[in-house]
Every structure is written in C-alpha cells, then in structure tokens.
Image (cartoon, rainbow, N blue to C red):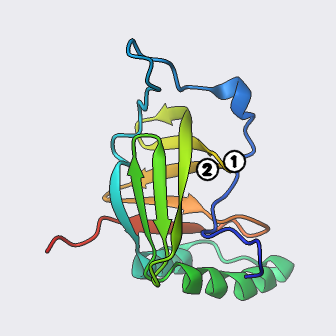
C-alpha cells in the first residue's frame, strides 16, 4: 500500500451524502445516531472469518481474479490485528502496531436494522453491515471484498 493509502480499506458507497442525511438534530442539539447502537463499541479484525467467507463466495474470473489475487492478501495483511472503536460521532482505527487515527462521522442513512451508512470527516462514505455477531465493510478500489470484524474477547 503506497503513501497516502487509507489506514483501512474503507469503501465509498457512492451515495450523495448531502441528499441522504439521516442525522437529525435532537431536542438538545446533538446529532442523532439512530441505527448505530449495534455498531457502538470495540471491534477487532476477524481474519479467519473473512478468509472463510471469501473462499465461500463466487470466485472472480479473468482480470478480476488477477486483481483480487494481488490486492486481497495485501489488504488482509494490513488489517491483521487491527481494531475499530465506534463512539458517538467518532471512530478510532488502530493497526496492530498501535498506530491509528480518529475520524468524526455523521449517520447518513440507516436503511434497515442491520446496516448503517456513515460519512467520515475525511469525506469517505462507508456502509457497515451487521451479520450475526459481526459486522463487515467492503474494500475500496477495484475489488469489492467484505472484511469482517468481531467483538474482542473479554478478559
């Protein structure tokens, strides 16, 4: 991954954020985060589950297979040991070495109880999908691969 690459392979959903704002002011002036309660808290990258789901999916062919073959292992390597924490209006992403960044976000849309689309302060728009006890988000760029996160084990 070259300089300037995002910390995590977060995908843009391509939605017009300005026209889809689901973040409404509440009576106390705070931005509502309806639809995000299931996403709040700490998460860790689930490499085993991601690889299992990737293997079970429809395998690409031709140039797409070559692209996935080159990019997928790089993305998995970058995500190994990574953590994401969602709080009210902020997500904190850290890599295995402890480096990371904090990004403010607004809820754009929560189309159903199992997904929420957020607009990050850096301009990225990402949809997070709940699947059982995990959530997934798609990678950016020419490959559209879901990466899964789970709750960290409790000590």
Which quarter shows the C terminus?
Answer: bottom left
Which residue in the structure is indicated by mark 2?
A: 126
Which quarter shows the N terminus?
Answer: bottom right
Please state which of residues 8 and 111 is positioned toward the viewer in this rendering: 8
Whole-percent x and y of residue 101? Answer: 54, 64
Residue 142 relative to residue 155: left or right: right
The reply to whether residue 5 is in sight is yes
Residue in view at x 44 percent, y 18 percent: 29
Whole-percent x and y of residue 10? Answer: 63, 61
Q: Are marks 1 and 2 in contact (CB under 8 Å)?
A: yes
Q: Residue furthest left?
A: 155
The reply to whether residue 117 is in sight is no
Please state which of residues 34 and 48 is positioned toward the viewer in this rendering: 34
State which quadrant residue 62 falls in. Answer: bottom right
| Mark 2 residue crowding within 10 angstroms, few (<14) / some (14–19) / many (20+) | many
Residue 89 relative to residue 133: left or right: right
Helix or strand or loop: what does disc 2 sit on? strand
Tell me the tag on residue 13: 1
């Amino acid at each position: 991954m070259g300089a300037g690459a995002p910390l995590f392979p977060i995908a843009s959903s391509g939605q017009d954020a300005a026209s889809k704002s689901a973040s409404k002011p509440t009576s106390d002036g705070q931005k509502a985060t309806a639809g995000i309660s299931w996403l709040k808290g700490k998460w860790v990258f689930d490499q085993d589950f991601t690889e299992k789901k990737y293997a079970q999916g429809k395998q690409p062919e031709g140039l797409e297979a070559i692209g996935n073959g080159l990019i997928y292992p790089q993305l998995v390597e970058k995500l190994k040991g990574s953590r994401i924490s969602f709080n009210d209006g902020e997500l904190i992403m850290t890599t295995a070495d402890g480096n990371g960044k904090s990004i403010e976000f607004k809820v754009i849309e929560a189309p159903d109880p199992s997904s929420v689309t957020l607009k990050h302060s850096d301009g990225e728009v990402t949809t997070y999908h709940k699947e059982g006890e995990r959530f997934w988000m798609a990678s950016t760029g020419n490959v559209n691969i879901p990466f899964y996160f789970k709750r960290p084990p409790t000590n």
